[in-house]
Amino acid sequence: MDVGTAYGRKPGQSLLELTQVGPGTPYGEVLRRYWQPVALSTDATTTPKRLRILGEDLVLFRTRRGAAGLLAPDCAHRGASLFYGGVEDDGIRCCYHGWVFDTEGRCLEQPCEPELGRHRDRVRQPWYPVREYHGLVFAYLGPPDRKPAFPVYDVLENLGEGEAVYADDKSFGAGGPAEVDFNWLQHWENVMDQFHIPILHARFSGNQFIPEMAVLPECTFSYTEQGVRVTAMRDFSDGRVLTRLTDVVFPNIRLIPGPRLTVVGPTPIVGWAVPFDDTHFKVFTLFRATNPDYLATESLKLGDGKNWHELTEEEHQRYPSDYEAQKSQGPTAVHSREFLTTTDQGVAMLRRMMAKQIKAVADGGDPVGVVREGETTTYHVLAGSYFDGVPAASR
Ligand code: FES
Ligand SMILES: [Fe+2]
């Protein structure tokens, strides 16, 4: 008798408590306890922009005096969208009856009411706090009494001669669409998956990085104070041994050392996989470099040096990369059908740590890494590429 045929296969299930991001969902509430990048600063202009973040529709704008604002789109009067509003010195004016709201949702004016609205201070347009850091707009979408200090990253501070920090929102760069159309966790988990590098990025699709990355690494996995780390050792058999530390940092941050090894030491690249909703996300990145093209030059090269957007269906098949592998796991991966093995240890550790944060929040506590004292808190980046062993962790 044939064994293992597809006949009668039961529908699979996804780990919804880890993948869903909307208000009230288990991990959605974890994500809401941290500042999240939501747009490039250059996207916040006097022309309102629609955003969808963690399943919530929002409108981003910048007042004529320069303050970024993030408001619910449906006007507190009768629900017309502020996407059609007009931006003024200190707020945005609804197109329907002209109510004006400032960046914190206060109603400044109701032009058709006596005295421009005697009771206008009773109205509040729902809003979220924002702040800008190195060219990205960050927002805090969580409970106001839990707002954390704003984290800054040591690799993005104290710049050297000729260096600058650049912001990027192209997700996979030349290797995929800027707005990615599957569940964000498939991508975040991939950060822990070092074994796909020699296979997908070296053997399968031709060498997409540098020959050294084709060496099968020896990996160990560990928890850090705020996430999970994979330590990948590669012996290049020429006297060089590379130790490459790749970290996920809660709740959705990735610290990936550039795979072309042009930087030795801590990675100057900090990325966030920000869910728009359950099946769309974008990777926002900040990186320190002397050259604004640094991130693009680190990214993978597809067959014949083409851009992902230029590939035919047949070329996508011949040169699959991160996008093809992760997207084809489904709009949301079907976890009940997985067969995790030793190489998936980092993925399993990440999921366990996610479940812990869900419980911490449900029990009324703070998830990992949340600091509430002070305006800012500094995160020390150790993830990186090292040839002479890893310097002792200084945190
Ligand atoms: S609906 Fe916005 S002012 Fe009336
Ligand atoms: Fe990859």
Image (cartoon, rainbow, N blue to C red):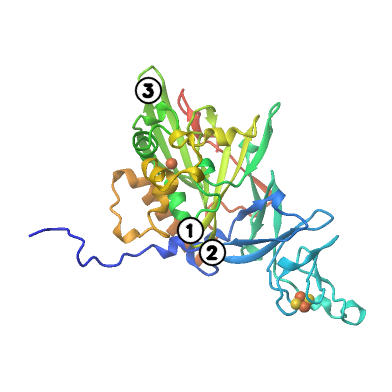
Q: Quadrant of the N terminus?
A: bottom left
Instruction: Tell me whether the residue at label 3 lies in contact with that at label 1, contact meaning CB atoms closer than 8 angstroms.
Output: no
Instruction: Say the numbered circle drawn on residue 357.
Output: 1
Task: Give the labeled residue for mark 2.
Answer: 29
Picture coordinates of residue 312 (x, y %)? 44, 45
Q: Secondary structure at mark 1?
A: helix
Left or right? Give the position of 179 relative to 188: right
Q: Which label lies toward us, 3 or 1?
A: 3
245 or 279: nearer the viewer = 279
Q: Earlier in the sequence, mark 2 or mark 3?
A: 2
Left or right: 312, with 275 as reference point: left
Q: In the rendered image, which quarter is residue 69 located in?
A: bottom right
Other residues around mark 1 within 10 Å, as few (<14) / some (14–19) / many (≥20):
many
Left or right, residue 155 beside residue 9: right
Query: Disc 3 on helix, strand or loop?
Result: loop
Q: Residue at x 50, y 46 (%)?
A: 176
CA distance separating discs 3 and 1: 39 Å
Residue 395 position, x and y percent, is 55, 38
Toward the right, the furthest residue is 115
For the point 41% across and 20% down, the residue is 240
User: Is 171 above or below relative to 198?
Assistant: below
Q: Is residue 137 visible?
A: yes
Amino acid identity at mark 1: Gln
Number of the label disc, if any, that sits on residue 236:
3
Decide: few, some or many residues near mark 3? Use Cα within 10 Å; few <14, some 14-19, many ≥20.
some
Percent coordinates x, y for residue 237 in the rendering: 35, 20
Q: Amino acid at mark 3?
A: Phe
Of the residues tagged 2 and 3, which is closer to the observer? 3
Q: CA distance from mark 1 to mark 2?
A: 10 Å
First reached walking from the N terminus: tag 3 or tag 1 = 3
Q: Is residue 149 above or below residue 224?
A: below
Which image quarter has ligand 2?
top left
